[in-house]
């Protein structure tokens, strides 16, 4: 079991993995229109990482998921989030300075029940992406570190 | 609340309690973790029935998938 | 020796939960709803986002999300520090 699971599970994982990741990024990008947001989408992408780690074992995935890269992505996400919060400091902390301004993500939204436009939301969309990046990387680091540690302990106890 | 929706609530909650009791009672660790994930998934369904899809997505992603993966790693490390 | 204590505590806890469940307000009718009505009416015009929940989480109550991100960051730091010796 330690080197990975059976051929059936591996084949299904390679089929499903991409769809789960694309769905997670969809939830992150459409956080201001549909249910979900940065935290939920990041959790979905990280669960795809967990699926890979459980199925294939740690040693094969370590070349694909680098812990250092994920740590850097996590810090980047948090710093971006705080930066967007500070940029609104002309009015207040966390002021939404982009919305209704007409630029990127600045189109005014139609009032009432409507399907929505992707180019709205202002800083909400940007913060969704920043938090999504942070949560994705943070939960990925947690799962990856625990997987590596569990494999190491298992090997030590076998000797 | 329509009667069909009430029946759906009751069925989901009863199965959830059964799964939670199974998670405590079962001796095999892997079966217990799977029962816990089933309870978590049913909790996500209950959130969805109560019109909270945001919380439902977070619960399904973290409670059912990530917690189960972490428990499986822990069982892998402790079992021979 | 210990069993009756646990049983009495369990009975009290169960009675408390049942009393709370009986005294609960009907679903979807909160007692005070001034803030809710304000958010539902004005969120779409003020922030130009359709999802009111995301509007509250990332704009009106942004401090909450900042704290959540900090908690997650601290958890990752703790886990990496905890398993650094093991995974070597």
Image (cartoon, helix red, strand yellow):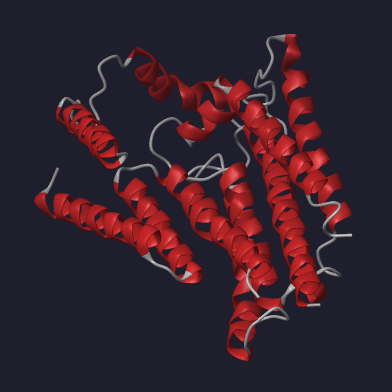
Residue at the extreme left: B3
Quarter occupied by residue B73: bottom right
Which image quarter holds the N terminus of chain A? Answer: bottom right
Can you give x and y, in whole percent of width and height, for residue C12 in the image? 22, 30
Can you give x and y, in whole percent of width and height, for residue C75 in the image? 70, 39
The vertical placement of B26 against C19, above or below, is: below
For the point 79% across and 52% down, the residue is C83
Q: Nearer the viewer, residue C83 or A74?
A: C83
Count of numbered marks: 0
The vertical placement of C33 against A4, above or below, is: above
For the point 26% across and 60% down, the residue is B15
Residue at the extreme top: A91
Can you give x and y, in whole percent of width and height, for residue C60 in the image? 55, 20
Q: Nearer the viewer, residue C82 or C71?
A: C82
Left or right of A55? Residue C17 is: left
* Residue A105 visible in rendering: no
Left or right of A127? Residue A40 is: left
Left or right of A39? Residue B39 is: left
The vertical placement of A55 against C58, above or below, is: below
Left or right of A78? Residue A29 is: left
Which image quarter holds the C terminus of chain A? Answer: bottom right
For the point 66% across and 18% down, the residue is A95
Residue at the extreme bottom: A7
Quarter occupied by residue C3: top left
* Residue A139 visible in rendering: yes
Quarter occupied by residue A98: top right
For the point 54% across and 52% down, the residue is B62
Can you give x and y, in whole percent of width and height, for residue C11 in the image? 20, 35
The vertical placement of C16 against A26, above or below, is: above
Q: Nearer the viewer, residue C19 or A53?
A: C19
């Amino acid at each position: 079991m330690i080197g990975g699971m059976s051929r059936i599970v591996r084949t299904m994982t390679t089929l499903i993995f991409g769809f789960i990741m694309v769905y997670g990024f969809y939830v992150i990008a459409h956080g201001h229109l549909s249910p979900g947001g940065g935290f939920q989408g990041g959790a979905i992408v990280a669960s795809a990482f967990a699926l890979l780690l459980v199925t294939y074992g740690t040693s094969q995935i370590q070349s694909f998921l680098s812990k250092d890269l994920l740590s850097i992505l996590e810090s980047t996400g948090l710093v971006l989030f705080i930066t967007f919060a500070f940029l609104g400091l002309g009015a207040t902390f966390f002021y939404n300075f982009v919305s209704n301004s007409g630029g990127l993500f600045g189109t005014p939204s139609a009032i009432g029940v409507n399907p929505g436009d992707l180019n709205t939301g202002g800083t909400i969309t940007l913060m969704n992406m920043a938090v999504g990046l942070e949560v994705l990387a943070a939960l990925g680091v947690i799962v990856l570190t625990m997987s590596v540690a569990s494999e190491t302990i298992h090997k030590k106890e076998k000797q | 609340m329509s009667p069909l929706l009430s029946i759906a609530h009751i069925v989901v909650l009863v199965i959830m309690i059964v799964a939670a009791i199974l998670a405590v009672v079962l001796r095999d660790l892997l079966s217990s973790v799977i029962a816990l994930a089933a309870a978590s998934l049913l909790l996500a369904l209950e959130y969805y029935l109560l019109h909270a899809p945001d919380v439902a997505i977070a619960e399904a992603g973290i409670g059912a998938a990530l917690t189960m993966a972490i428990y499986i790693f822990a069982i892998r490390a402790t079992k021979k | 020796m210990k069993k009756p204590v646990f049983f009495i505590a369990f009975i009290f806890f169960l009675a408390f939960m049942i009393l709370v469940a009986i005294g609960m307000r009907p679903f979807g009718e909160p007692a005070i709803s001034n803030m809710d009505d304000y958010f539902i009416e004005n969120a779409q015009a003020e922030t130009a986002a359709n999802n009111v929940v995301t509007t509250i989480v990332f704009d009106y109550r942004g401090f909450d999300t900042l704290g959540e991100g900090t908690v997650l960051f601290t958890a990752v730091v703790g886990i990496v520090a905890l398993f650094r010796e093991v995974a070597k």
